[in-house]
Each structure stands twice: as C-alpha cells, then as structure tokens.
Amino acid sequence: MRFRGIIVGTMDDLNFWGKRVLARVDINSPMKDGRLLDRSRIEAHAKTIRELHESGAKVVVMAHQGRPGGDDFDHLEQHARALEPLVGTSVKFVKDVTGPEALRIIDSLEPGDVLVLDNVRLLAEENIQAEPERLVKTLLVRELAPHFDVYVGDAFATAHRSQPSVAGFPYVLPSVAGRVMESELRGLSKVLDVSSRSFFIGGSKVDDVVKVMPNLIGKGTVMTGGLVALTFAKAYGQYLGPAEDIVKSLGVEVIEGARRVLEKGKVMVPVDYVVERPDGEVEVQEAGQELSGVPKDVGPTTVAAYRDVIDASDAVIFKGTAGVVEDPRFRRGTVALLEAALKSGAFVLVGGGHASAALSWVEEGLRKAVGYTSTAGGAMLYLAAGLKMPGVEALAYSYSKFIARGGWP
Ligand SMILES: Nc1ncnc2c1ncn2[C@@H]1O[C@H](COP(=O)(O)OP(=O)(O)OP(=O)(O)O)[C@@H](O)[C@H]1O
Ligand SMILES: O=C(O)[C@H](O)COP(=O)(O)O
C-alpha cells in the first residue's frame, strides 16, 4: 500500500502458512490498580492476530504496557487472557521476552499457535530511541530475529517511537503492516487533510505534544487540557499553586519547549479548573488565582469557551483527556468536550487509548457520530503534524529490501 509517497507491504502480500511470525502490536491499555480499564486496543489488534492464527502462522505477539516506573507499567498476562476469546484459540503467555524460556516456547510452536511475550519494555534497551543502525544491534533484535521468518508491524500507536521492537526488526526481517497499521494509515491520511479544524490536546504526554505543536500551530485552533494545559498555562506565566511542582517535574526542557511554541502562535488554556483540595474535597476555581488544590480537570467555563471553537470547526481532532479520567470525579470535562464535538456536526477524530476509552462514557446515541477513532494519540498527532514515523519508515525499507524483490523466503 502507498502512504504519503512511500510503499509498505501488507498481510495480503505474504503466505503465512507454517511461518514463524513476530507480530508487534500496541495493546497498551488504560489500567488502574492493576486492572484493565479499557480493551479497545486489544480488540482492535485481535483481528490481526486471529488472521495470522487462521493462516496457519506460528504467531508470537510482542507488545508493551505503560512506561517503566509508571502506575500502569505491568505484565501482559491479562492482555493475553483478554485476547483468547477474541482470537478464537488458546493463547500461551510467557513471563519472559528474550530469555531461554521464551526462546524454548517460540521454537516449539506449531502452525496456528499463538504466544504472547511479556512486556517488551521490561528490557532496558527497548526504552531507548535511536537510529536503525543502533536498533538492529540491540540484544532484543539480535536474540529474537533469528527465530522468525517475518515481522508484522501492527503497532501504529507506537510507530512514532524509534524503539527496537517498533523500528528495528524490519531492517533484518521481511516485514509488512498488520491490519491495524494498514487501516490507520489509510483512514487517517483521509481525515487529517481537512480545512477548518481545531485540536483538543490533553493528557499527560506533554513531551510529545511540545514536539509536534510547532507543526500544528497555524493548522487550526489548539485547545488544551490535562497536564498539557497546565504546562502551557505555566508557559503563559500563570501561577499554578499546588500544581507548580507537577509541571516542574516534567522538566525544564518541556516548559521551555512550550514557551517556544507560544512564540509561534497561541494555544487556548483553561479559564477554570476542577481542583482536588488536600482534604480530598473537589471544587471549581478560576485559573490564575491562588488554587486551593491540584487541578485535575477543566471547569465548566472552559468547556463553554472550547465549545464555541468546536462549533465553528469542520473537524475536531481529539487527543488525550481533559482530566484524570481514572477517577470518575474528573471525567466531566473530557465527556462534555467530546459531547460538544459530537453535537457540533463537525467531523470528529478521537485518538489514543484514554481518549477512546472516554467515548464509552458518552451517551450511546451520540457516540455513533464519531467520524474516526484511532488507536493512537501521540502517533496520530505526529501524522497530523507531518512528522516522520520510524515504525512506518522501517516497514517501507523492508518492503524495498525484501518484499518488492520477491525476497520472501
Ligand atoms: N490534570 C492532570 N494531571 C495529571 N494527569 C492527567 C491530568 N489530566 C489528564 N491526565 C492523565 O493523562 C492520561 C491520558 O493522556 P494520554 O496522553 O495518555 O492520552 P491517550 O488518549 O491515552 O493518548 P496516547 O494514546 O498518546 O497515550 C490519563 O492517564 C490521565 O490521568
Ligand atoms: O499509548 C500510546 O501512546 C502508545 O502505546 C505509546 O506509548 P508511549 O507514549 O509510552 O510510547
């Protein structure tokens, strides 16, 4: 398939019967207290895994959950259990990635078997980002690649990361796009190039947002929520009270990056917050004043201001959440903004694990008005900003090196 001037192979290009397939998917899901809060990514990628199983491949699933040190950093056993009914066969799980136990099971698989490896980010080197020449030298690639015939790159939501599991294997194995990767590339390239659009960008991955924002300024009004909003409020010189330390913990380079974005153009920040006081009580407070607690959602006046922008847009691109949605007390801003977008008649694109999960809290009749739901938040923004996606570039390289030349073993 062609995508923005490059060609990547798809699963239609290969016969998988009896082949050892390493399928990198993105089933990184919202979790709280060790429990999965949402399974939409698992459901999305199950289609790719099921097709490989039914094609008689020996399927090994590689994925991550969370980031080291994060509350949602966990094993993938629950994910393997959740996949089983969706894939239609028993799913093996091994609490290992490149160790002897994993390799023993990989080498013993029969056609149609499915094995899920443990969280690939348990390996320190998976958490680096580097050029392909460095990625192919990692232990992860060197240990696993010899046990496989083909790599299926399905982790579109992680394709903006130049990490070994995402952008290393296609340089040493014949590789094609999985069904999620294929549909996201086809779907998003259609919906991202619309005229009058606005962006709601929230959530906690401020480093990603600050990186792509310079390319979004001028492409539509940007409304912010979550930690992204607090960072830009700080960059505007707002005093955040108890939230000062939270923003400072993101790092000086992130705040400086936000300031550089504001030199290129303005972004909208909340005019009121829902704060959680030290005594646990919740109240709405105006921005800019001495906050009595940590801001954990946007307030009603902000929703009203953002609604005016949304109503004037032909398309609204939604990434991240307005509040700490793991806590039901801080979901109102996100749900209200999603409902405003869905009622506005604009084309609504919702991207990301938590943002897509938030759709489930919107009343069902309204939910149907969503124009496109992407498994990716950050990666979708990279695409909207026209930035390179290492995971897609790697698949394009593999197509030219292996697939196009009939290099399929
Ligand atoms: N004010 C806030 N303070 C702290 N965390 C916040 C705040 N608002 C939102 N968050 C956190 O942001 C996270 C959701 O943002 P995130 O950027 O991960 O969105 P996403 O839709 O999952 O996109 P992606 O797919 O890129 O991860 C949630 O875990 C939520 O708790
Ligand atoms: O949820 C996501 O955005 C993807 O799984 C990538 O996760 P990351 O931002 O921790 O790399």
Image (spheres, grey):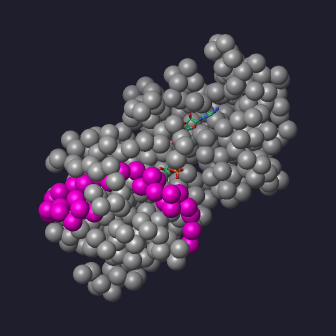
Tell me what residue is drawn at x 29 percent, y 45 percent.
80
Percent across and percent down for residue 330 are 57, 24
Tell me what residue is drawn at x 21 percent, y 48 percent.
91
Quarter occupied by the C terminus: bottom left
- Magenta stretch contains residue 120: yes
Question: Which residues are the magenta region?
Answer: 103-131
Above/below status of 76 relative to 365: below
- Single out the residue that lies furthest toward the bottom: 405
Percent across and percent down for residue 227 are 66, 38
Above/below status of 228 relative to 303: below
Percent across and percent down for residue 56 are 15, 63
Residue 246 quadrant: top right
Quarter occupied by the N terminus: bottom left
Residue 382 quadrant: bottom right
- Single out the residue that lies furthest toward the right: 237
Whether residue 330 appears in this view of the structure is yes
Tell me what residue is drawn at x 16 percent, y 69 percent.
18
Query: Ligand 1 shows up in which quadrant of the image?
Result: top right
